[in-house]
Image (cartoon, rainbow, N blue to C red):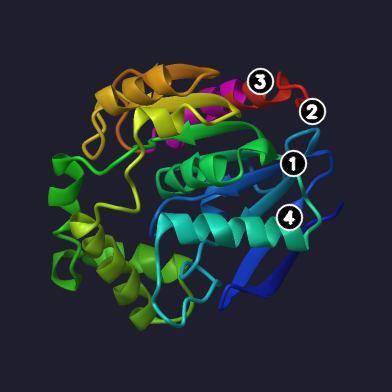
Amino acid sequence: MNRSSGVETLNGIDQYFEQHGEGRPLLLLHGFTGSGADWQYVFAEAEAPVGFRVIRPDLRGHGRSTNPEGLWSFGQVARDMFGLLDRLGIERFQAIGMSAGAKTLLHMATQQPARIDSMVLVSAAPYFPDSARAIMAQSTDENQSADDWRQMRERHPRGDEQIRELWRIARSFAQSYEDMNFTPPLLSTIRARTLIVHGDRDPLYPVELALGMFDAIPDSALSVVAGGGHGPIFGELAAPFRESALAFLRDAPSDRT
């Protein structure tokens, strides 16, 4: 399959996505205020990992995807992703999610456990700890630097109102207690083989949260990145992450029942 892009209208939004490569479907979910294009810094733009059909969406309200009613929850984004996969005729798949993408995968893996064969959760969290809520509460226009605005404008082409809306949603997470509330019994229903990747210096989510998920998810492995912060998969950490993540995914049987 050659590289292609498209838009599917579903759940009240225009859902933008790109796909390329051939093989097992691999869903890549970016972090909050990011976009699908961020994965070029992990998987070189010209490369589709051998053996994978990569699906790379912009999450609701991010990048080229719309969100006209301003409704945003990780549970809803999980339903968006299932809607997109259904439109593409994909039943079973593998996935990598970073931060917001990883939290979306927790919802997907508990909403429809049989559909995910294996997944990699980077900088995930089962709930928002106080450390994260304090940072989220500061997500205002006034607290953003000129460089923050530049980076956001590069990712989100629909104007400054789109960017302000994303920061408003990020700020609302500080008072959100239902959407991200994964207990160990709920995590224990996950059937996907799961690799948890977490920096031991993550300012949002202490590494103890990763240990808790590792204990609760039945078929899971844990990789703690020494000295790693939030999203320890970019820059010099991209190559080792890419190697370990793809090895983990390729090791997963495609006919799991």
Q: Amino acid at mark 1?
A: Arg
Whether residue 57 is visible, yes or no, is no
> Residue, x 81% and y 56% (percent of image)?
89
Magenta-tinted stretch: 231-244
Residue 111 among those drawn in magenta: no
Task: Please name the residue that numbered disc 3 is placed on.
Answer: 247
Q: Position of residue 252 (x, y in %)?
A: 71, 22
> Residue, x 63% and y 21% (percent of image)?
248
Quote the CA–CA distance across marks 4 and 3: 21 Å
Question: Which comes sooner in the sequence, label 4 or label 1?
Answer: 4
Q: Determine whether 183 is above or below 240 in the image.
A: below
Q: Amino acid at mark 4?
A: Gln
Tell whether label 1 touches label 2 (CB within 8 Å). yes
Task: Please name the residue that numbered disc 4 is placed on.
Answer: 19
Quote the CA–CA distance across marks 3 and 1: 19 Å
Q: Amino acid at mark 2?
A: Ser
Q: Position of residue 48 (x, y in %)?
A: 74, 42
Whether residue 244 is visible, yes or no, is yes
Quote the CA–CA distance across marks 2 and 1: 9 Å
* Quadrant in which residue 25 is drawn: top right
- Closer to the eye: label 3 or 1: 1
Most foreground residue, 140 or 218 = 218
Question: Which comes sooner in the sequence, label 4 or label 3?
Answer: 4
Crowd around label 3: few <14 · some 14–19 · many ≥20 (10 Å): few
> Residue, x 78% and y 59% (percent of image)?
88
Tell whether label 1 touches label 3 (CB within 8 Å). no
Task: Please name the residue that numbered disc 2 is placed on.
Answer: 254
Question: Which comes sooner in the sequence, label 2 or label 1?
Answer: 1
Q: Is residue 2 left or right of residue 121?
A: right
Crowd around label 4: few <14 · some 14–19 · many ≥20 (10 Å): many
Q: Is residue 49 left or right of residue 42?
A: right
